[in-house]
Structures are given as structure tokens and as C-alpha cells.
Image: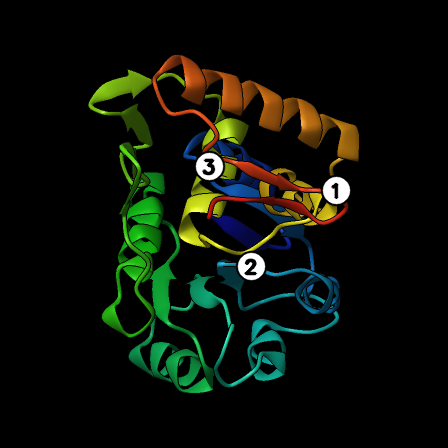
């Protein structure tokens, strides 16, 4: 799952980004509201973790710039403002959840998983197709009950293709979704990633799961 972390404290931003990546998220970072809106206009995200007290444009400005529905990312506000009125204002402005600083990192991850499970726009925590089973929350993969040892990027790629079966993803889109917009990796690295994932799936008894549409990209039908 891809996430935009918007926090003006570089120390906290770096700490959270490191932890969220270790927890299986693809993370882009922004230090102010203007930069955040640039990322949101250019890339797609599942979540936005948003501080309210931002320079140049505050968190409420970011919330107001988000679309009202459709493919809108879920927004979790992180703020030192702990008054009920602050929470109400943020939720009324479009936030989906609110977490007061200071907080435990495990609590942040739990809130993000809870947002992903909300019925209105729920995304399944367990994906299954042709004997392949992916438990997104536990970060475990298997084929016909046999554990599959995947790298974080292989797991993210398999989740992306399983979650959007039938949709063709171009190499550039895959790169953005699993590596983040700041990555210096090339399209060639996507080919290597797909090759390695295919080999692991085939060795586990699931061949030809990932298809290549020449000139278009990859998909799981």
C-alpha cells in the first residue's frame, strides 16, 4: 500500500518513514502542504498521514484540496492539537481518522490497517487466486499452503497485481507504486523484479500467473 507522509519535522518524518517502510508500506514524504499537494496531484496514494501545523500551507489546506470522493486516499491526521474541537474540525474538513501526538508507532500502523478495513471502501486483507494466498496485514505469502519467501518489493508487486486483477500496469506505474516517486530505479529493474517473482511462483507450483502484454505492461488475469 502506498502512503504520503506529510510532516514538517525532519527528525519525526525520517523516523516514521523508516518504520512505515519496514512495516510494508511504500512511502513518499513531504515537508509542507504545498509540496504535499504537488505529490497528490502527480501520484496516486492509498493513505495520507498528515500533520496539521505545516509551513506554507497547513493540513486543512491539503484536506480542502482533496477530491470529495472516488479515488480519494484515506487521510490520517497526526497532530499535537488534542482538543475535541480540533478533531471535529479535521474530521469535518475530510480527515478519516485522527491520532494525537505523542503516539506509539504500533498505534499508527494499527490505525492505518483499520482504515484499510473500513466497509465503505474496504480492501481485503487476504487476497487469493489460483492457489496463491497473500495476507497483507501479516505480510505473508503462500502457494497451495506452502510459504513463499518474497522480498518487500516482490510482495508489493504481487499485492498490486492481485488487488487489481485484469488491469494492465505499465512499468513506470509499477515503479511508482512499489518504489515511490523519489526512486532512482529504472524500468529495467521492474523487468528483473517480475522475472524473480515469476520464478519463485513457478518453483512453488504456480506458473504463468503474471502475464506480459507487450508494449503495455503486466497483469494477473
Residue found farthest to the top: 203
Examine the rendered structure and indicate whether residue 13 appears above or below residue 150. below
Left or right for 80, reference 195: left
| Between 169 and 64, the one nearer to me in the picture | 169
Residue found farthest to the left: 145
For disc 2, the neighbor class at 10 Å (few under 14, some 14 to 19, many from 20) is many
For disc 1, the neighbor class at 10 Å (few under 14, some 14 to 19, many from 20) is few
Marks 1 and 2: CB-CB under 8 Å?
no
Going 43% across and 79% down the picture, which residue do you hit? 90
Badge number at residue 45: 2
Going 46% across and 37% down the picture, which residue do you hit? 158
For disc 3, the neighbor class at 10 Å (few under 14, some 14 to 19, many from 20) is many
Marks 3 and 1: CB-CB under 8 Å?
no
Going 28% across and 54% down the picture, which residue do you hit? 124
| Between 134 and 42, the one nearer to me in the picture | 134
Real-space Cα distance between discs 1 and 2?
Answer: 14 Å
Image location of residue 163, percent across then percent down = 41, 51
Badge number at residue 182: 1
Provide the secondary structure element on which disc 2 rests. Answer: loop
Provide the secondary structure element on which disc 1 rests. Answer: loop
Left or right for 165, reference 115: right
Query: Which callout, 1 or 2, points at the residue further toward the start of the chain?
Result: 2
Badge number at residue 158: 3
| Between 112 and 81, the one nearer to me in the picture | 112
Going 35% across and 68% down the picture, which residue do you hit? 97
Image location of residue 185, percent across then percent down = 76, 31
Examine the rendered structure and indicate whether residue 182 appears above or below residue 89. above
Asked if residue 185 can be seen in this view, the reply is no
Amino acid at each position: 500500500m502506498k502512503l504520503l507522509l506529510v510532516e514538517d519535522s525532519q527528525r519525526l518524518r525520517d523516523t516514521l518513514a523508516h518504520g512505515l517502510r519496514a512495516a510494508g508500506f511504500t512511502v513518499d514524504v513531504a515537508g509542507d502542504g504545498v509540496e504535499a499537494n504537488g505529490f497528490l496531484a502527480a501520484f496516486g496514494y492509498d493513505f495520507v498521514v498528515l500533520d496539521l501545523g505545516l509551513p506554507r500551507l497547513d493540513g486543512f489546506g491539503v484536506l480542502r484540496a482533496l477530491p470529495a470522493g472516488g479515488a480519494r486516499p484515506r487521510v490520517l491526521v497526526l497532530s499535537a492539537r488534542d482538543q475535541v474541537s480540533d478533531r471535529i474540525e479535521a474530521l469535518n474538513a475530510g480527515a478519516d481518522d485522527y491520532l494525537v501526538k505523542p503516539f506509539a508507532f504500533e498505534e499508527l500502523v494499527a490505525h492505518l490497517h483499520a482504515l484499510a478495513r473500513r466497509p465503505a471502501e474496504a480492501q481485503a486483507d487476504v487476497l487469493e487466486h489460483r492457489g496463491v494466498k497473500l495476507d497483507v496485514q501479516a505480510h505473508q505469502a503462500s502457494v497451495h499452503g506452502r510459504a513463499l519467501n518474497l522480498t518487500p518489493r516482490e510482495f508489493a508487486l504481487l499485492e498490486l497485481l492481485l488487488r487489481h486483477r485484469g488491469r494492465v500496469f505499465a512499468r513506470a506505474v509499477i515503479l511508482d507504486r512499489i518504489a515511490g516517486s523519489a526512486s532512482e530505479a529504472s524500468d529495467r529493474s521492474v523487468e528483473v523484479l517480475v522475472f524473480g517473482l515469476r520464478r519463485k511462483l513457478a518453483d512453488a507450483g504456480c506458473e504463468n500467473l503474471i502475464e506480459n502484454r507487450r508494449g503495455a505492461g503486466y497483469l494477473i488475469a
